[in-house]
Image: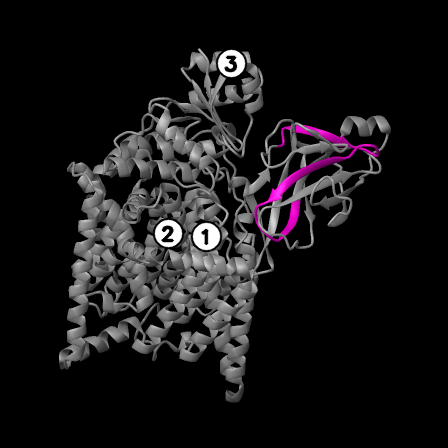
């Protein structure tokens, strides 16, 4: 068996490229056209126009009672309303009626209208559990800010309408039998995303085109310069260069901050701009040198070197250029999809984003890695990986964006950049540009991950996965028998990438170790018996690379092992854990995940039949990852280091590679048997199919964010700004808690963003408090807040006994009732705008 053998045929006949210049442009134009046709076919939820508190029964529908709700549609083209209903179990049993009943829905512009704009009937749920029911409405031709009145009736049976029995939604109210009541039903609005909205988003994006420059400076420039000065850049095609440069850059920034922290050298905004100027100067000088060199006659020796490098990388310059162009356009379309996904977000989603933002704030304030996370939470600083946060801090310094907006933009850029890393790993393993491009399309438009990372704010693992392929690409060059120079540079760059990856995400460094082990194992078997190749020398070089990487991070690594890893190992053997505990199929099967799984499975089988070593390597890698993730089930120390979920959500990488390989093989096989006159029509059909499938996937990915994970609202931001200007820094602010999972509690509304945006501690704090020794005390106190928030005298005593004086109620709301606090006379209102409240406990 041979793997990645550059001398095997001319430009690898087993991986014939399907794209020429014309086909690349045709595919790109088709993808753009199909993306435009996406508009008008996609429904978005609008978190700003919602009231999702479901703690009370607002009213019971029967044949004599009606319930209504006024609201304002912030977005145009209203097309759906979700409400929460449940059967009234007690009344149903007393009436002896267990059948389901229909609810008549009428939509008016105001309660006084006689003619509804829409009428329909829906089947009410028969369950006694509160159930969301979506009412599909024909697309309304409303302008932004249009008022509506939803009217519900029921001819028979008893249906409970769920919501909050107080004014939870400032732009409307509930009605019972036509009379306004102090309540709001729970509802969520959706709207149609049309061509005008797309043009608006593109225009808004173009107005921020200047962000390209700081992004390139952070994500690409340092790595490109190192590749260029090392003499290794031309050993890779342009797409590979881009991804490797990104991996080096993302790894280098946290490594530099690690050592400046050790040396007590503080980063400043002015220092970042000076460093940026130096990098741009070096780039300018080098580009001028390359331009002058290209104008001169190349010596014969350089031609021979170029010929050798061509045989190593397996590409022609023109072909590589149009491959890069296609890859960049795939990236831009992916980025457009990712930015459209977050068009309605005020801050990044879910709980991870909060502690990411707070660590970025701390790094920005200190100019170094924090030595403590007090007063926000108590844990060893090395218990968590701060590498990504260094990158984000530099980005906010260069752009002067506010923290939430900067994190949201950078996160989506990194998400779209996954197409580069998947391309690099695909090209590294298969030596096929076409497989790399197809894999990039699968990652960008078809697989649910990494698009769904946005819903979690899973920025650290995402950044680690962008770095991961660069190490293997460098090792492959090291393993190539024709490469006899630049080994020291390969080892140094590989060590930088590996060390920086460790600082970015602890688990992903385990993924990398499994990948390298799989690659070298298959490489060793493939080269066994080949006297011209010495795999032992490759192993020695990789070992030196690993030792150097450890040296780069030794100050952090030593503390991390002693304070985090060893205690985790000592306590990881407990009760029996089932195999694949926490495995969730939806993580890899939603959107077009099932389709991509089928493609990947076929690619794996076909690759093994053809004895392609990369197929065996990927299979070995996946098996190793699941083995490590199941150590707890095997009762082996270290079971808590890698979770099943973290492995599952990175499987988009091998899935995309195997799927891209199978599609390429399918096309190649058909091209070989078709008459020549049918090849061009066949390729046109293939391009249409790829574009159509990408469209179908895009329609599902663009709305993949779970609305439950969106906690903040626009009205929270001025309130938090008021807190930063008026509340003492040492005051801990109580916010609405909820049980997040793993025995930990998080904030349910925009109050959770008080710490990163104002610097004031909150209770509950960011969920990283779970890594500290006092996590149980915090969780117990959060649960007591939930239990005693309805008994205000007990609630007051709880706050006083814990030296807590301030309570924040965000626009989304939660378990704590602001109206009850206001009416009790025990609290003073410090701030109240829209549905945001800040109370202070009276002495």
Query: Of helix, strand and loop, which one carries label 3?
Result: loop
The answer to whether residue 373 is above or below residue 691 is above
Sort mark 2 into few (<14), some (14-19) or many (20+) by Cα contacts within 10 Å: many
Distance, label 2 to label 3, CA atoms, is 51 Å
Sort mark 1 into few (<14), some (14-19) or many (20+) by Cα contacts within 10 Å: many
Asked if residue 572 can be seen in this view, the reply is no
Mark 2 or mark 1, which has the lower sequence index?
1
Compare residues 106 and 483 and report the one nearer the observer. Answer: 106
Residue mark closest to the camera, 2 vs 1: 1
The answer to whether residue 255 is above or below residue 726 is below
Task: Report which residue position mark 2 lands on.
Answer: 465
Residue 379 screen position, x and y as percent: 33, 28
The answer to whether residue 756 is above or below residue 497 is above
Is residue 338 found left or right of 291 in the rendered image? right
Task: Report which residue position mark 3 lands on.
Answer: 826
Mark 2 or mark 3, which has the lower sequence index?
2
């Amino acid at each position: 068996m041979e793997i990645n053998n550059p001398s095997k045929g001319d430009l690898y006949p087993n991986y014939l490229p399907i794209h020429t210049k014309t086909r690349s442009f045709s595919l790109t134009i088709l993808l753009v056209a199909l993306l435009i046709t996406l508009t008008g076919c996609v429904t978005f939820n609008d978190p700003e126009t919602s009231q999702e508190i479901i703690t009370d029964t607002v009213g019971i529908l029967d044949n004599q009672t009606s319930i209504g709700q006024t609201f304002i549609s912030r977005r145009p083209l209203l097309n759906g309303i979700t409400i929460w209903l449940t059967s009234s179990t007690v009344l149903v049993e007393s009436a002896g009626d267990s059948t389901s009943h229909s609810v008549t829905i009428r939509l008016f512009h105001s309660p006084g209208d006689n003619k509804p704009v829409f009428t329909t009937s829906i089947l009410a749920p028969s369950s006694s559990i509160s159930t969301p029911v979506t009412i599909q409405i024909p697309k309304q031709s409303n302008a932004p800010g249009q008022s509506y009145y939803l009217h519900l009736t029921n001819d028979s049976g008893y249906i409970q309408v769920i919501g909050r029995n107080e004014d939870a939604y400032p732009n409307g109210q509930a009605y019972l039998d036509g009379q306004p009541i102090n309540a709001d039903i729970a509802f969520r609005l959706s709207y149609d995303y049309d061509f005008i909205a797309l043009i608006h988003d593109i225009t808004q994006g173009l107005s921020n085109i200047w962000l390209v420059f700081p992004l390139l400076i952070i994500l690409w420039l340092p790595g490109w310069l190192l590749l260029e000065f090392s003499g290794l850049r031309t050993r890779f095609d342009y797409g590979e260069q881009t991804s490797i440069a990104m991996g080096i850059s993302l790894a280098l920034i946290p490594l530099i901050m690690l050592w400046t922290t050790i040396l007590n050298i503080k980063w400043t905004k002015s220092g970042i701009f000076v460093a940026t100027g130096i990098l741009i100067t070096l780039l300018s000088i080098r580009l001028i040198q390359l331009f002058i060199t290209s104008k001169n006659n190349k010596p014969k020796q350089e031609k021979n070197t170029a010929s050798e490098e061509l045989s190593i990388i397996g590409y022609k310059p023109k072909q590589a250029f149009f491959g890069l162009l296609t890859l960049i356009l795939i990236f831009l379309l992916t980025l457009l999809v990712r930015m459209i996904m977050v068009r309605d977000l005020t801050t990044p989603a879910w709980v991870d984003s909060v502690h990411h933002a707070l660590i970025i704030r701390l790094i920005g304030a200190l100019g170094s890695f924090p030595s403590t996370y007090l007063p926000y939470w108590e844990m060893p600083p090395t218990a968590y990986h701060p590498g990504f946060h260094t990158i984000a801090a530099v980005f906010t310094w260069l752009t002067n964006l506010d923290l939430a907006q900067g994190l949201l933009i950078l996160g989506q850029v990194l998400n779209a950049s996954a197409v580069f890393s998947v391309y690099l790993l695909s090209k590294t393993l298969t030596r096929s540009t076409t497989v790399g491009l197809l894999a990039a399309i699968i990652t960008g438009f078809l697989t649910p991950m990494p698009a769904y990372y946005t819903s979690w704010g899973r920025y650290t693992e995402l950044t680690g996965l962008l770095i991961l392929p660069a190490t293997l690409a460098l090792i492959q060059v090291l393993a190539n028998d024709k490469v006899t120079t630049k080994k020291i540079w390969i080892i140094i760059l590989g060590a930088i990438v590996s060390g920086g990856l460790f600082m970015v995400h602890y688990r992903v460094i385990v993924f990398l170790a499994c990948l390298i082990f799989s690659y070298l194992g298959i490489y060793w078997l493939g080269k066994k018996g080949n006297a011209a190749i010495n795999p032992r020398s490759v192993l020695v070089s990789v070992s030196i690379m690993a030792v150097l990487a450890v040296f780069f991070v030794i100050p952090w690594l030593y503390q991390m092992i002693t304070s985090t890893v060893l205690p985790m190992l000592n306590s990881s053997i407990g009760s029996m854990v089932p195999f694949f505990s926490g495995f969730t199929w939806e993580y890899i099967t939603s959107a077009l995940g099932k389709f991509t799984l089928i493609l990947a499975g076929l690619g794996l089988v076909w690759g093994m039949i053809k004895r392609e070593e990369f197929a065996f390597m990927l299979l070995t890698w996946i098996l190793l990852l699941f083995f490590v993730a199941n150590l707890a089930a095997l009762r082996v120390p270290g079971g808590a280091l890698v979770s099943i979920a973290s492995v599952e959500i990175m499987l988009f990488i091998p899935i995309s590679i195997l799927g891209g390989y199978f599609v390429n093989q399918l096309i190649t096989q058909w091209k070989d048997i078709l008459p020549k006159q049918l090849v061009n029509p066949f390729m046109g059909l293939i391009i249409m199919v790829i574009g159509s499938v990408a469209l179908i996937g895009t329609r599902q990915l663009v709305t993949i964010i779970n609305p439950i994970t969106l906690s903040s609202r626009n009205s929270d931001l001025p309130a938090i700004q008021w807190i930063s200007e008026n509340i003492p820094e040492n005051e801990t602010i109580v916010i609405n808690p909820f049980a997040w999972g793993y025995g930990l509690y998080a904030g349910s509304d925009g109050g959770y963003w008080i710490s990163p945006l104002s610097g004031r501690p909150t209770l509950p704090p960011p969920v990283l408090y779970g890594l500290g020794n006092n996590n149980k005390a915090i969780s117990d106190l959060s649960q007591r807040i939930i239990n005693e928030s309805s008994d205000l005298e007990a609630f007051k005593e709880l706050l006083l006994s814990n030296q807590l004086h301030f309570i924040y109620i965000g626009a989304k709301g939660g378990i704590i009732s602001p109206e009850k606090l206001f009416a009790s006379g025990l609290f003073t209102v410090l701030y109240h705008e829209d549905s945001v409240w800040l109370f202070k406990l009276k002495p």
